[in-house]
Image: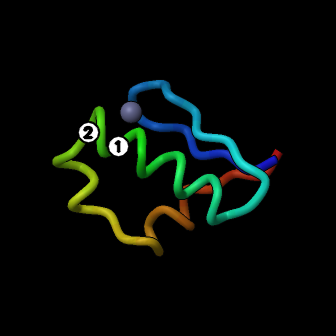
Amino acid sequence: MKLIRCECGFVARGDSDDQVIGVIRGHMASDHPALLDTVNREDLLSWIQVE
Ligand SMILES: [Zn+2]
């Protein structure tokens, strides 16, 4: 399981990098649209934790 913890406490989970990035981008689009514009795929990849 891979995950990204958002600064607001939301946790995006997925089985692959692409899946967890899709979840966190969907969350940011709805809750943090300004933040979404400032992060690229490499940033998101660097935030992924594996558990
Ligand atoms: Zn958030």
In the drawing, what numbered circle is on residue 28?
1
Q: Residue furthest top?
A: 9
Is residue 37 placed above or below 12 in the rendered structure? Answer: below
Q: Is residue 50 left or right of residue 8?
A: right
Q: Residue furthest bottom?
A: 42
Residue 22, x across and y down, in percent: 52, 55
Q: Is mark 2 within 8 Å of ligand 1?
A: yes
At label 2, which amino acid type do we have?
Answer: His
Q: How is the image coloured?
A: rainbow
CA neighbours of label 2 inside 10 A, class few (<14), some (14 to 19), many (20+): few
Q: Quadrant of residue 33?
A: top left
Q: Is mark 1 within 8 Å of ligand 1?
A: yes
Q: Looking at the image, which residue is at 26% across and 39% down?
A: 32
Is residue 45 placed above or below 25 in the rendered structure? Answer: below
In the drawing, what numbered circle is on residue 32?
2
Q: Looking at the image, which residue is at 62% across and 52% down?
A: 20
> Element at badge 2?
loop
Q: Is residue 36 left or right of residue 16?
A: left
At label 1, which amino acid type do we have?
Answer: Met
Q: Are marks 2 and 1 in contact (CB under 8 Å)?
A: yes
CA neighbours of label 1 inside 10 A, class few (<14), some (14 to 19), many (20+): some
Q: Quadrant of residue 30?
A: top left
